[in-house]
């Protein structure tokens, strides 16, 4: 059986696909930003001396790390309206992805915090820094430098996860690839193009993040 | 060697001759074969409400199943003298061509491409795309939805992502926003969770859902994109085709109309009127 490729439909719709790719990247970055904030709170709660905070943190991370992301997306998009919480679909997806990212970042940050030598914190206490100042000026800069490679990898993983937004009709790359394949029957061309765009974007993001890591490690 | 060849040849000729005389002609109609067999074999599916699906007891039920039983009733006076062969949609034509089934009732759209391979009966249902509304939602019917659109309110219609999905939504309501989901279940979820104001789905499914779950769903009363469903048969047996057509015609417009009307009411929730006496209804 001979298959005849026809990339004309891709050429005619590349603008839509690139737009979808851009939206996916934005969603990943915004979700990671909110995820970092949530992760920091959860990580500090996990290492705090307050057992209630510790239990809250471990409950949050267990829930979001052990539930498939697609299930979380559907609960937020289809389930929350039943209890009166209605968000626009992109907002709903970013909300879900941020909570998901926060759970993963919490573990990464917790490990990063626990890797900081105790002596560094005691030195801060010795010169009279407050708890907040120790966290903000000593722990967090060291922690971020240590966990940057993990965060970079997670950003790429998060970007690939944005393909699940197509299931709630967010107009990102996978949504347009599926639309194109269904409308034109050019299944192979549509999905091959989407795959290439994802690979190239992930490669570029990884390259830029590696440069950032090197700059920060020398600085 | 030549003796063996001659013997085989004579035996073959004898067997063909016997079957020829038993059949009573060059190729007897499927009608005689089915009558001689004592049961009808119908190809159908098992996963589409309200056409062909399994109930809680695992029994095959639905409107297509009823059509098979109407044919069995006409053949044997017994609607249960029928065997249903479950088949996937892409097996509908091949199973007919190899005589695995006598006829297929499987919500099959009559189309020119298919007519090149099989024959179709007269239509026993005309499908369309309708609008499913959530019961207790903002809009009670299509007119209210259209009025809202005219006022400039944002109207969202959920639809299965497929060819012409966006065009279909514009045909239903120009200016409405389409949310295209990858499977039908998500379309219903969108309606249930008020993510969409309405869902564009098969009208038969709407009629089923509105009749079985009126507390959840409403039929907006709108439909578009008509397409006819017919029973598919082999195209080389005019006697059989005529018989099936005659049975369906009588069930829809003649003496046996109660059978068709009862099936229609059961699966689509609508009571059809009795055929009008006088000039046959299809010519009015």
Image (cartoon, rainbow, N blue to C red):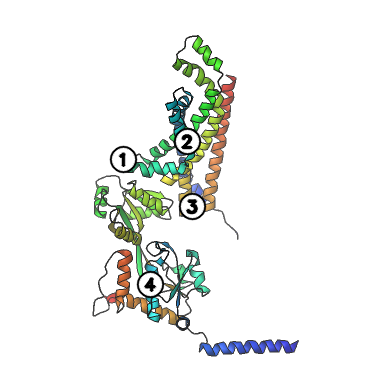
| Number of other residues with Cα within 10 Å of mark 2, as a class: few under 14, some 14 to 19, many 20 or more | few
Per the rendering, the mark at residue B232 is none
Horizontally, residue B46 falls left or right of residue B127, namely right
| Label 4 secondary element | helix
Residue bearing mark 1 = A84
In this picture, is B259 found above or below A198? Answer: below
Q: Mark 4: give few (<14), some (14-19) or many (20+) Cα within 10 Å.
A: many
Q: How much space separates mark 1 and mark 2, taking CA atoms? A: 26 Å
Q: Residue at x 49, y 52 (%)?
A: A181
Quadrant containing the C terminus of chain A is: top right
Q: Which mark is residue A181?
A: 3
Residue B107 sits in which quadrant? bottom left
Spatial CA distance of label 2 from label 4 is 54 Å
Residue picked out by circle 4: B67
Name the spot of residue B225 as percent of width and height, x first: 35, 61
Chain to which mark 3 belongs = A
SS label for mark 3? helix
Query: In the rendered structure, are the residues bearing label 1 and label 4 in contact, judged by CB atoms less than 8 Å apart?
Result: no
Give left or right: position of B136 versus B21.
Answer: left
Secondary element under disc 2, as helix, strand or loop, is helix
Read off the residue under disc 2.
A62
Side of A14 relative to B145 (left or right): right
Vertical order, A167 against A211 (above or below) = below
Q: CA distance from mark 1 to mark 4?
A: 45 Å
* Labels 1, 2: front one: 2
């Amino acid at each position: 059986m001979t298959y005849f490729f026809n990339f004309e439909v891709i050429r005619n719709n590349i603008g839509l696909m690139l737009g979808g790719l851009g939206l996916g990247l934005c969603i990943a970055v915004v979700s990671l930003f909110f995820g970092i904030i949530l992760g920091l709170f959860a990580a500090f709660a996990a290492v705090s001396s307050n057992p209630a905070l510790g239990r809250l943190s471990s409950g949050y991370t267990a829930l979001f790390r052990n539930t498939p992301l697609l299930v979380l997306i559907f609960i937020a998009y289809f389930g929350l309206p039943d209890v009166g919480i209605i968000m626009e679909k992109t907002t709903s997806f970013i909300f879900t992805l941020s909570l998901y990212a926060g759970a993963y970042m919490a573990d990464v940050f917790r490990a990063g915090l626990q890797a900081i030598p105790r002596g560094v914190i005691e030195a801060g206490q010795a010169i009279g820094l407050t708890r907040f100042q120790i966290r903000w000026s000593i722990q967090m800069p060291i922690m971020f430098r240590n966990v940057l490679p993990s965060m970079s990898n997670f950003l790429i993983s998060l970007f690939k996860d944005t393909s699940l937004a197509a299931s709630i009709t967010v107009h990102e790359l996978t949504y347009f690839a599926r639309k194109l394949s269904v409308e034109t029957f050019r299944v192979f061309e549509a999905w091959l193009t989407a795959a290439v765009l994802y690979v190239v974007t992930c490669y570029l993001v990884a390259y830029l993040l590696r440069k950032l890591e090197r700059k920060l490690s020398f600085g | 060697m030549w003796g063996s060849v001659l013997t085989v040849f004579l035996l073959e000729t004898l067997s063909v001759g016997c079957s020829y005389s038993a059949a009573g002609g060059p190729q007897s109609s499927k009608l005689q074969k089915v009558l001689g067999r004592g049961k009808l074999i119908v190809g159908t599916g098992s996963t589409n409400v309200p056409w062909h699906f399994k109930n809680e007891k695992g029994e095959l039920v639905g409107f297509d199943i009823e059509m098979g039983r109407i044919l069995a009733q006409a053949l044997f006076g017994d609607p249960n003298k029928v065997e249903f062969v479950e088949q996937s949609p892409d097996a509908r034509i091949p199973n007919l061509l190899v005589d695995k089934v006598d006829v297929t009732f499987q919500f099959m759209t009559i189309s020119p491409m298919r007519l090149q391979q099989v024959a179709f009966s007269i239509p026993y249902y005309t499908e369309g795309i309708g609008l499913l509304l959530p019961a207790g939602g903002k809009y009670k019917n299509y007119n209210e939805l259209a009025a809202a659109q005219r006022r400039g309110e944002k109207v969202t219609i959920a639809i299965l992502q497929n060819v012409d999905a966006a065009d279909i939504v514009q045909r239903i309501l120009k200016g409405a926003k389409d949310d295209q989901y990858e499977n039908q279940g998500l379309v219903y979820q969108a309606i249930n969770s008020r993510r969409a104001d309405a869902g564009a789905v098969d009208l038969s499914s709407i009629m089923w859902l509105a009749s079985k779950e009126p507390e959840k769903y409403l039929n907006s009363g709108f439909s578009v994109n008509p397409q006819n469903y017919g029973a598919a048969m082999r195209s080389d047996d005019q006697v059989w085709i005529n018989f099936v057509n005659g049975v369906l015609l009588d069930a829809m417009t003649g003496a046996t109309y109660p059978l068709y009307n009862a099936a229609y009411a059961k699966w689509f929730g609508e009571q059809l009127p009795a055929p009008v006496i006088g000039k046959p209804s299809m010519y009015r």
